[in-house]
Amino acid sequence: MKTNMRRKLAQQPFEEKIYQVGQLLQLSAKLKSQRGANDLAFTARRLRLRENATRGVFADERQLGIRRDPLIISAIKRKAVLTFRYNGKQRTVEPQTYGLSTAGREVLRACERSVAKSSKPSGMAKLFDVAKTSELQETGLRFPQALPAHNPDDSAMTEIFATLPRQRRFSRPDVMAACNVTFRMGNELWGGSIPEGGAEIFSEA
Amino acid sequence: MSEEPTSIPLADVRRAANDLVAAGVIQDYALGGALAAIYYVEPFTTYDADIIFVAADKGLTAGIPAIYAHLQERGWPVEREHLVVHGFPGRFLAVAGLTDEAVREARKIEYEGVPAKVLRPEYIVAIAASVGRHKDLARIEQMLEQAEIEKALLDDILRRYKLRLPTS
């Protein structure tokens, strides 16, 4: 059946066949230009959809009171110490992770510096409800890195807006031996090297 | 090529080739390649025309520089080694062996009032067998299925040029 149809097409006058080849070329050129236009339209549509989706997410978040506070995000990125009032007390913290809790609230995982212990971190990170904070600002101080127990994939959060990288931990004795400062914190031995005024702190796992 | 072809200006291509014959730049020519196959089978897309010619100059270049120089001199549009008419490229290919015989045995036709020659289907099949690319094998299948082929002639050509058709 198909072969017969093709044979029939083959028996057309040459002029007619050449005309049809010309039509095939036109069709091919049209499809190519259409495909190019479609590719552009498709990309533009995807960008619009993504933009609208992002806008939608932000709008929904605003309705829910989610701010994605740029001050907190910036402080985490730059390892800047924050201070704020919380439950009637002034807190000074080293922010570790900022995100949405499993209950849908904006939370900040941060290590509180004790005023009594001359602004040293307590070693424990607490979860702060960002909606309950006030007078949030940077102190101007910096901290070197995340806590040893810091987990960038904080299990208390469903979405993370910003987090510190995990602390580099070494258990190799030669690394510890290279440290020019060592000290014990709780059950852990800590070591540090201070090359050219900078500080690298290692802990023995 | 600067623009994509949207038609086949075959009559113009043949006028250019006839012009070369008249000027003595080439001795003879025939339409080969896909367009020759289309003479015998259903139409399909092709993007150029192969003009297989018998050179007047038997030197190493087969007179190809002279062909394009002559075409340009006569006002035909030439881009590198293609005659380009309305965006459709025509390529001049010098004969050798099988193609030489194919041109000499080519069928005389008339297209839109312009006399020309087109390779016989048996030679189209034999040339495709000698080249052997995927598209040539597909062409052989198409020709055997749709064109009226003189089997004795085809067998003779294949035997003389030591060619074999692909087995399916």
Image (cartoon, coloured by chain):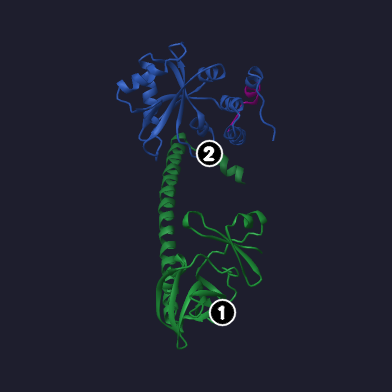
Chain colours: A green, B blue
The answer to whether residue A126 is above or below residue B118 is below
* Secondary structure at numbered mark 1: loop
Query: Where does label 1 land, which residue?
Result: A102
Q: Position of residue B140 (x, y in %)?
A: 60, 32
Q: Residue at x 48, y 79 (%)?
A: A115
In this rendering, position of residue A192 left or right of residue B53: right
Query: Where does label 2 land, which residue?
Result: B42
Q: Residue at x 41, y 55 (%)?
A: A40
How packed mark 2 is, by other alpha carbons closer than 10 Å (few <14, some 14-19, many 20 or more), is: many
Can you see residue A43?
yes
Label 1 and label 2: CA atoms lie apart by 67 Å
Please report the bounds of the magenta region as a residue range: B147-155
The answer to whether residue B100 is above or below residue B87 is above
* Secondary structure at numbered mark 2: loop
Between circles 1 and 2, the one closer to the viewer is 1
Mark 1: amino acid: Thr
Can you see residue A56?
no
Q: Residue at x 57, y 39 (%)?
A: A7
Mark 2: amino acid: Glu
Q: Position of residue B5 (x, y in %)?
A: 40, 38
Taking the view exactly as shown, the residue that stands out farthest to the bottom is: A88
Taking the view exactly as shown, the residue that stands out farthest to the top is: B58
Viewer-proximal residue among B63 and A172: A172
The image quarter containing residue B142 is: top right
How packed mark 1 is, by other alpha carbons closer than 10 Å (few <14, some 14-19, many 20 or more), is: few
The answer to whether residue A13 is above or below residue A182 is above
Q: Position of residue A5 (x, y in %)?
A: 57, 44
The image quarter containing residue A122 is: bottom right
Viewer-proximal residue among B26 and B112: B26
Q: Position of residue A39 (x, y in %)?
A: 44, 54
